[in-house]
Image (spheres, rainbow, N blue to C red):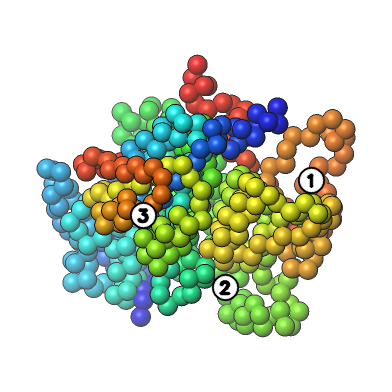
């Protein structure tokens, strides 16, 4: 039987993920379970070290890498010791060559497969699908990432939360990094706006995970989506996303975002292109539409091409037919001339589709148009 | 203005550089070199992730989840880098039973002026020598094989 997997998720270093993991590990030990620390990265934090007291800690093994010796988690030693619960810090860590797996989350999979329960920790910026977004928000790209499927497969995800102000207070008090690193950290990553953005990402991620698991348990309890559709109950249990696309390259990002949302919500994904009547796509447009069709097929989405004079009316009709609960659109073009006085596309969609969420996906190239590419901005 | 916008969105010269890739790591130097090339030619970069469909699935079935989970962030990242470099980008995902099969499918369906192929190294994914040899024999048009320094470990 596969072990139980619990992940402590945080917005940044220093929020107390490892501390909380150790705290819960000790509670399990006090309840009579056999608990060991498979790997702990205390970062010389006195509070963390103190919390680890009283828990058995497996020794690390040494690995030669590029002429130096590094200490790593000893996976074979965990199997040999075979505890009931193993605490393994920092699941996104990259192992040096020569050990069993390239990544620690892969080591953890083996431990779980051996029937050992695992508690582990990670920061939200390591999540692969959020890597771009976090880099955009904070200007810092994280190298060590892990796939979204790891978080999805975890039995429990616990958000360890702290306000940005409180975290900065901990940093200033020397509880996160040694004194000589505090100033640089405050000037770079640990700024209130960065932390607030990361906190929002972590909160959203956990909320979506809770929603995903809740939807999964509802489906398990009530039957498959098809069975529920037969009972006219699909609105109560499942989401269906409709992304409004055009045969342009910028729609590809919209499709990628829509697919990610669909995965998180466990939703079906429809792509809709509203074609002007009597004007089938030609040349480059036809090429792009064909590429969109192939992309939809690869992703398991459905591309719908409907003729219509009015985008919103056609989208509203299709949404009603398909049971859409969520509409994604690209960033509408700037409204000029008399159009400035009319109703905007998102407003019209919200009015025509009551009860359906509408989300706008930013056009990155347009944002860069506004600010100019980095080289031009530097001039 | 709309003419200029159109030129900008599609790559000013109308040239297309097809950039197939496989796996979950791509050499950063290879990507940087491809972007420099695309920029110098004012060309549109067409990054194409080649997804492998297992034999027990129909070839036109959706790609396994792990393939899509690898492909989309990689394409997102390449698009982001390309946009920062001022290069127009038009992404693709192509399917096949093997990387070579996906390459053949891609060559059938894509229009391009130059094919840039990353070679595999110990630190990054890329095409095996036998696939590159096959490409050199079978791909029409200009083919450029990029192999980063084998000790180069920076990857995206």
- Quadrant (top left, top right, bottom left, bottom right) of the N terminus of chain A: bottom left
Q: Name the one closer to the observer, A36 or B40.
A: B40
Residue A91 on image: x %, y %: 35, 56
Q: Which mark is residue A345?
A: 1
Give the residue number, with chain letter if any, for mark 3: B138
Please report, as a chain letter, where disc 1 is located. Answer: A
Say which residue appears at 76% left-offset and 63% top-offset: A319
Please report, as a chain letter, where disc 3 is located. Answer: B
Give the residue number, with chain letter if any, for mark 2: A216
Q: Name the one closer to the observer, A16 or B134.
A: B134
User: In front: mark 1 or mark 3?
Assistant: 3
SS for callout 1: helix
> Which quadrant of the structure image shows residue A114?
bottom left
**Callout 2: 10 Å neighbours few (<14), some, many (20+)?**
some
Outermost top residue: A379
Residue A161 on image: x %, y %: 50, 50
- For the residues marked 2 and 3, what is the alpha-carbon distance in whole angstroms? 48 Å
CB atoms at circles 2 and 3 under 8 Å apart? Answer: no
- Side of A335 where A52 appears, left or right: left
**Badges 2 and 3, same chain:** no
């Amino acid at each position: 039987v596969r072990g139980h997997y619990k992940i402590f998720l945080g917005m940044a270093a220093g929020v107390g993920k490892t501390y909380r993991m150790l705290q819960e590990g000790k509670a399990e030990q006090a309840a009579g379970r056999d608990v060991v620390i498979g790997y702990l990265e205390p970062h010389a934090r006195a509070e963390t070290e103190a919390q680890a007291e009283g828990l058995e800690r497996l020794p690390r093994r040494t690995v030669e890498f590029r002429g130096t010796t590094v200490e790593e988690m000893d996976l074979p030693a965990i199997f040999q010791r075979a505890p009931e619960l193993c605490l393994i810090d920092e699941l996104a860590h990259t192992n040096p060559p020569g050990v069993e797996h390239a990544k620690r989350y892969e080591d953890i999979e083996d431990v779980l497969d051996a029937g050992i329960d695992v508690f582990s920790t990670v920061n939200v910026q390591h999540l692969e699908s959020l890597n771009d977004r976090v880099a955009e928000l904070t200007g810092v790209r994280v190298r060590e990432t892990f796939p979204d499927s790891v978080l999805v497969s975890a039995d429990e995800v616990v958000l360890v939360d702290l306000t940005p102000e409180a975290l900065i207070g901990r940093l200033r008090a020397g509880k996160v990094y040694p004194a000589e690193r505090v100033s640089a950290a405050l000037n770079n990553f640990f700024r209130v706006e960065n932390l607030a953005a990361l906190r929002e990402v972590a909160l959203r991620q956990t909320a979506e995970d809770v929603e995903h698991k809740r939807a999964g348990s509802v489906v398990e309890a009530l039957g498959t989506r098809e069975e529920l559709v037969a009972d006219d109950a699909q609105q109560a249990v499942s989401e269906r996303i409709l992304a409004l696309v055009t045969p342009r390259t910028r729609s590809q990002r919209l499709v990628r975002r829509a697919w990610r949302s669909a995965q998180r919500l466990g939703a079906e994904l429809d792509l809709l292109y509203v074609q002007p009547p009597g004007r089938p796509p030609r040349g480059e447009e036809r090429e792009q539409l064909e590429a969109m069709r192939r992309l939809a097929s690869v992703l398991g989405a459905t591309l719908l091409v409907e003729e219509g004079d009015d985008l919103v009316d056609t989208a509203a009709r299709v949404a009603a037919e398909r049971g859409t609960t969520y509409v994604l659109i690209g960033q509408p073009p700037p409204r000029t001339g008399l159009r400035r006085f009319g109703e905007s596309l998102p407003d019209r969609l919200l009015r025509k589709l009551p009860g359906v969420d509408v989300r706008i996906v930013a056009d990155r190239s347009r944002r860069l148009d506004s600010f100019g590419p980095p080289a031009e901005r530097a001039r | 203005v709309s003419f200029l916008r159109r030129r900008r969105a599609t790559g000013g010269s109308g040239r297309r550089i097809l950039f197939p890739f496989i796996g979950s790591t791509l050499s950063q130097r290879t990507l940087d070199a491809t972007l420099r090339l695309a920029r110098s030619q004012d060309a549109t970069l067409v990054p194409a992730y080649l997804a492998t469909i297992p034999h027990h699935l129909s070839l036109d079935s959706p790609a396994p989840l792990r393939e899509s989970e690898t492909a989309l962030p990689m394409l997102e990242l390449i698009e982001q880098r390309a946009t920062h470099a001022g290069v127009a980008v038009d992404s693709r995902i192509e399917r096949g039973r093997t990387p070579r099969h996906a390459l053949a499918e891609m060559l059938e369906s894509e229009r391009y002026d130059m094919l840039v192929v990353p070679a595999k190294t110990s630190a990054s994914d890329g095409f095996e020598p036998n696939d590159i040899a096959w490409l050199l024999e079978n791909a029409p048009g200009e083919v450029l094989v990029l192999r980063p320094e084998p000790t180069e470990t920076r990857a995206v």
